[in-house]
Image (cartoon, helix red, strand yellow):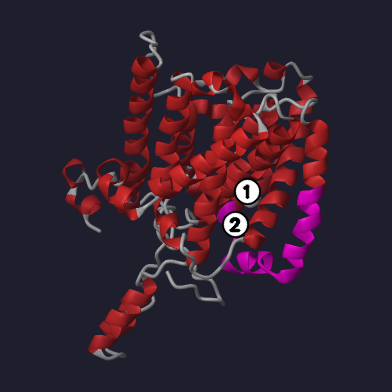
Amino acid sequence: MFQAPSLFQRAPLPPATRESEPRHEQTLTATAPRAAAGTSAPGAAAPAAASAKKRDPYFDNVKYLAIVLVAVAHAWEPVMDGSRATRALYMIVYMFHMPAFILISGYFSRSFDMTAPKVKRLITSVAVPYVLFETAYSLFKRYADDSPDMAISLVDPFFLTWFLIALFIWRVTTPIWQAIRHPLPVALAIAMLASVSPDIGDDLDLQRVLQFLPFFVLGLLLKPEHFQRVRRREVRLLSLPLFAGALLFAYWAAPRMQLGWFYRANSAQEMGAPWWSGAVMTLATFGCALALTVGFLAWVPGRARWFTVLGAGTICGYLLHGFLIKGAEYAGLFDHYTWLSGPVGLVVVSLVAAVAVTLMCSPLVGRALKWATEPEMNWAFRKAAARR
């Protein structure tokens, strides 16, 4: 999933040059050489450096709104069985919310090159949080759900931790995708092969890693001008009939379509479908998800809003909201209060999830959890790698 970017600059959008998707600040390579060469005043480098570190509010807005959709959709899962409309909305949200996150993650991974500082950043901001929260979720289920047999397994991601291990794998392979001639067709071919390969198994959630791979690779290929084009007025207008049509189709398909096609966690054979349908559905869902993602990105505000600052804390919102959802399930809340499956209950569940994840994305929570989501760990690395 995922922290993000300050004052918006309309044209052009600043390129991402940091190795980490959560912090997409610019490097100072554009200003430092000239200062060193003596072509600018000594004090000119400081404002330039401060400006270069500014975050783009557009991407912070994208991440905050996307994480709200993630939390709300997770909250719908225990209560949507009795509502065809809610299931249809769930299908639409699940079609694009993770692809949007993954695409943005790829966009801000473009500069990853396996140098020591970037490898260190990858380990501390992705691998270490995966280990910590995979352990925490496993222990939470063991004791809160009275499941003494629940084992701690770092090769079998539990609930939402799969995204962290997937992001680690995707980012490590970034140099490969940047080196080959046609990365997106290759990634799509790999996703199609994964969807018809039941022997891949559950280790590291490789089905999801491979089937979601094309969105990450597409993000690597994007440039700032692509986001400018997406945000044009005509794209926003076209997105209205797109979402209306998607809602009608989802309402029709809700009782007929397996949700496994949206999760991308299993092969076609594991879902009882013919093998060839895996390849067909991979291409179909990629096209639909991309169209809905474009529609979503088109409506995200580009200027700073009250929630922009929360976009920098989406990693906390993503990792913490699962405790709320699973805790309510383990406590039998959804079974005891059956009215939560009704229209009023669905509204209440949605509001609670949105408010809770908003609070979890706050800077206060981010600072409190920095030891787990962004530990320094200089002691674990050689000095060259630990140096910023």
Magenta stretch encompasses residue 183: no
Question: For the magenta stretch, what is the residue range?
Answer: 219-244
Whether residue 165 appears in this view of the structure is yes
Dividing the picture into quadrants, the one containing residue 207 is top right
Position of the C terminus, as image quadrant, is bottom left
Q: Which residue is mark 1?
A: 183
Q: Main secondary structure of the magenta part?
A: helix
* Relative image position of residue 341 (x, y in whole percent): 63, 28
* Relative image position of residue 89 (x, y in whole percent): 70, 39
Q: In the shown orientation, is residue 105 left or right of residue 276?
A: left
Compared with 156, 50 (above or below) is below
Dividing the picture into quadrants, the one containing residue 97 is top right
Q: Residue at x 60, y 61 (%)?
A: 300
Q: Secondary structure at mark 2?
A: helix
Mark 1 → mark 2, Cα distance in angstroms: 9 Å
Q: In the shown orientation, is residue 272 left or right of residue 44?
A: right
- The answer to which of 275 and 370 lies nearer the viewer is 370
* Relative image position of residue 313 (x, y in whole percent): 39, 51
Q: Residues within 10 Å of mark 1 (few under 14, many from 20)?
A: some
